[in-house]
């Protein structure tokens, strides 16, 4: 367990600032001599990025929630095998923009797939792999969607109705409450400089966690 690297995921609704704050976190880590593998879901591999295109393109295909769920896990299976496990096995940190908590939030919370169905696929595809630490960037849906719209055209998932994103947010907050040891929640609706101060504090906490692990390894 302790020879393994650290698996950090960053979650949140649409446009809350995951990409922006992952950059901030990664810069902080690099300044402190940690060079993480930075990746994302859906995606992170050639095949996974192709699946991402299928998932997000606006083509009126009427994709079913179960189809979406299986595509997300297909991309994840490849990502785990090609990128995440090899990096963790080398003792490296992995910082991943979304992981399976997003599936619970979007496919289950948002689209209504049973939680048990997601959890069966999670066992099947991931075995015992779970994030060590998850940062949830939380903001009201109107705030995130305004930022997402400000950035350009909305993709297929971003075009869901706002009640869908309310359910996504509720699911994330519930997951954070149920897994409070692993989660840190940051209010991402405030000024970016204030958010980033807290992101750096999370970075410092991660470095402590890592150094404790290293010390226990001896
Ligand atoms: N999905 C994913 C599933 O349905 N199931 C799954 O299992 C998985 C893994 C793509 C989609 O896939 C779905 C969920 C998604 O719909 P994505 O690309 O990670 O996933 O999702 P997005 O939320 O669309 O990611 P974005 O890159 O679009 O948004 P970010 O990264 O949250 O936001 P960011 O950093 O690009 O910021 C958006 C804008 O806001 C500004 C930024 O400068 C930028 O312009 N901003 C702020 N402005 C003011 N104040 C702040 N505090 C700000 N923070 C950022």
Image (cartoon, rainbow, N blue to C red):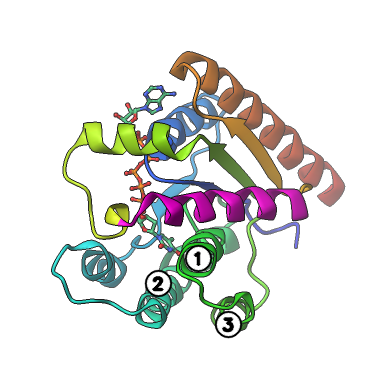
Q: Which callout, 3 or 2, points at the residue further toward the start of the chain? A: 2
Residue 132 visible to an observer of this rendering: no
Ligand 1 within 8 Å of disc 1? The answer is yes
The crowding category of the residue bearing disc 3, from other C-alpha atoms within 10 Å (few below 14, some 14 to 19, many at least 20), is few
The crowding category of the residue bearing disc 2, from other C-alpha atoms within 10 Å (few below 14, some 14 to 19, many at least 20), is many
Tell me the CA gap for discs 3 and 2: 13 Å
Residue 153 figure quarter: top left
Residue in view at x 44 percent, y 57 percent: 164
Q: What stretch is highlighted in magenta?
A: 160-179
Residue 217 visible to an observer of this rendering: yes
The mark found on residue 72 in the picture is 2
Residue 88, horizontal then vertical, whole percent = 57, 59
The mark found on residue 103 in the picture is 1
Q: Relative to residue 61, is residue 217 depicted above or below?
A: above
Q: Does the magenta stretch include residue 180?
A: no
Does the CB distance between marks 2 and 1 fall below 8 Å?
Answer: yes
Q: Relative to residue 7, is residue 198 depicted above or below?
A: above
Secondary structure, mark 3, is helix
Does the CB distance between marks 3 and 2 fall below 8 Å?
Answer: no
Q: Which of 75 and 208 is in front in this view?
A: 75
Going by the image, does 164 lie left or right of 136?
A: left
Secondary structure, mark 2, is helix
Residue 162, horizontal then vertical, whole percent = 39, 49
Residue sitting farthest toward the left: 59
Q: Which callout, 1 or 3, points at the residue further toward the start of the chain? A: 1
Residue 33 figure quarter: top right
Tell me the CA gap for discs 2 and 1: 8 Å
Which residue does the numbered mark 3 point to in the structure image? Answer: 117
Going by the image, does 39 lie left or right of 46?
A: right
Secondary structure, mark 1, is helix
Q: Relative to residue 78, is residue 209 depicted above or below?
A: above
């Amino acid at each position: 367990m302790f020879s393994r690297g650290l698996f950090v995921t960053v979650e949140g609704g649409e446009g809350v600032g995951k990409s922006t704050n992952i950059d901030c976190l990664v810069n902080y880590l690099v300044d402190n001599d940690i060079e993480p593998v930075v990746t994302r879901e859906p995606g992170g591999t050639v095949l996974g990025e192709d699946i991402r295109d299928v998932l997000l393109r606006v083509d009126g295909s009427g994709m079913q929630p179960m189809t979406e769920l299986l595509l997300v896990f297909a991309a994840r299976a490849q990502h785990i095998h090609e990128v995440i496990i090899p990096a963790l096995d080398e003792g490296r940190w992995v910082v991943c923009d979304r992981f399976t908590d997003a599936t619970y939030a979007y496919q289950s919370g948002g689209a209504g797939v049973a939680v048990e169905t997601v959890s069966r696929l999670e066992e099947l595809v991931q075995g015992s792999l779970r994030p060590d630490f998850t940062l949830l960037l939380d903001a009201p849906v109107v705030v995130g969607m305004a930022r997402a719209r400000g950035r350009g055209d909305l993709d297929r998932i971003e075009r869901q109705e706002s009640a869908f994103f309310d359910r996504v947010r509720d699911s994330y907050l519930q997951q954070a409450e149920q897994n409070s040891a692993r989660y840190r929640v940051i209010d991402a609706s405030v000024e970016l400089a204030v958010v980033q101060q807290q992101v750096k504090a999370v970075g410092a906490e991660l470095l402590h966690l890592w150094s404790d692990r290293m010390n226990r390894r001896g």
